[in-house]
Image (tube, rainbow, N blue to C red):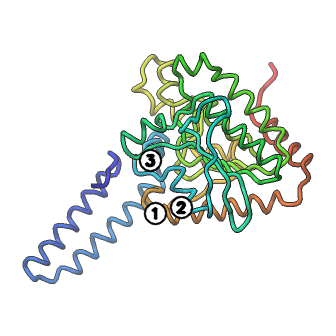
Amino acid sequence: MAIVLDFEKPIEDIQNKINELKELSESSGLDLDTQIKSFEQQAQTKKKELYSKLKPSQKLQIARHQERPKFLDYVNMLCEDFIELHGDREGMDDRAIIGGLAKFEGKPVMIIGIQKGKTTKENLEYNFGMPQPQGYRKALRLFNHANKFNLPIITLIDTPGAYPGIKAEETGQGSAIAVNLREMSKLNVPVVSIITGEGCSGGALGLAVANKVMMLEHAYYTVISPEGCASILWRDAAMYAKAAEALKITSKDLLKLGIIDAEIKEPLGGAHKNPEQTSKNMKNAIIKAFEELEGMTPEQLKEDRYNKFRAMGKFIEA
């Protein structure tokens, strides 16, 4: 049974009426096509109106939707001949970060992303999409491999943040992310990143120092989760909606602020309603991004990345 978010209840009510009319039509033989079509039109109009005016806290719910496509779903729809490469070469294969070689539009690329699960068992395997230091070190190994063999890099990001456990801190979580930021900035190949769901804090940024950073329409990208922000500012995580509004976490806000380069449209209702169309939109955005970066020298790519991140943020001198 499909999961219905709280703000989607008005649409569900109309859909229930449609289903009731269809059942009545079948059981009684009555011709109710006119009434059914009227309700279907009403549902579509309501959907368009609802999804055109979503609050940040509502987008948050869509970005975290259990049925939203995961990294491996997108890989299989975006690429061909994906070969996963395992391990950080120091003794661990963090399953929260998955990456490998693939063909994108017939050309070899390195594609790396953060994986979440669809079931409790899978979420335990992928640590709920929260990478540990070994995951970032694995990603760095793959970045260096791509750099050595002149392969463009695609990263797909969906994480509530890097794993905050004691073991992660003991094994160098902060330094692992910091090293990735430094080394990604020095890559000689084009890097394209897409925030596909959640994009929280350094956990997301550790894979997103790219020439082109894009977001799906209902994804979010932020320095801290709205719940975490609310807990710090108001000592109450329940005030997350207020924090989400203030943090400017949506694709439209971040595009306006120059943090991302493009918003990728999702099907009406979110990526989970039509993963194939979502992947097609992502593929077109990636193709366009690589075309814009084509012909740039390694030095130009590094300069482009440097200038992009240096331009973020504003300050006023008192």
- Name the kind of residue labelled 2 in the image: Thr
| Picture coordinates of residue 156, whole percent (x, y) | 61, 48
Tag nearer the camera, 2 or 3:
2
Mark 2 crowd level (few <14, some 14–19, many ≥20, 10 Å Cα): many
Label 3, secondary structure: give it: helix
* Residue on which the image places disc 2: 278
Work out whether 170 lies above or below 128.
above
Mark carried by residue 274? 1
Mark 3 crowd level (few <14, some 14–19, many ≥20, 10 Å Cα): many
Work out how far the residue at label 1 is from the one at label 2, CA to CA, in angstroms.
6 Å
| Picture coordinates of residue 219, whole percent (x, y) | 54, 46
Mark 1 crowd level (few <14, some 14–19, many ≥20, 10 Å Cα): some
Q: Nearer the viewer, residue 173 or 108?
A: 108
The quadrant of the picture occupied by the C terminus is top right
Q: Nearer the viewer, residue 134 or 46?
A: 134
Q: Which numbered disc, 3 or 1, marks the residue that appears first in the sequence?
A: 3
- Name the kind of residue labelled 1 in the image: Asn
Q: Which residue is pictured at 20% across the width and 64% down the height?
A: 17
| Picture coordinates of residue 300, whole percent (x, y) | 90, 48
Please indicate whether residue 167 sits to the left or right of residue 109 in the image.
Answer: left
Mark carried by residue 62? 3
Please indicate whether residue 14 sits to the left or right of residue 25 in the image.
Answer: right
Q: Which residue is pictured at 17% across the width and 71% down the height?
A: 21
The answer to whether mark 3 and mark 1 are in CB contact below 8 A is no
Q: Nearer the viewer, residue 242 or 125?
A: 125
- Name the kind of residue labelled 3 in the image: Ile
Q: Nearer the viewer, residue 127 or 279?
A: 127
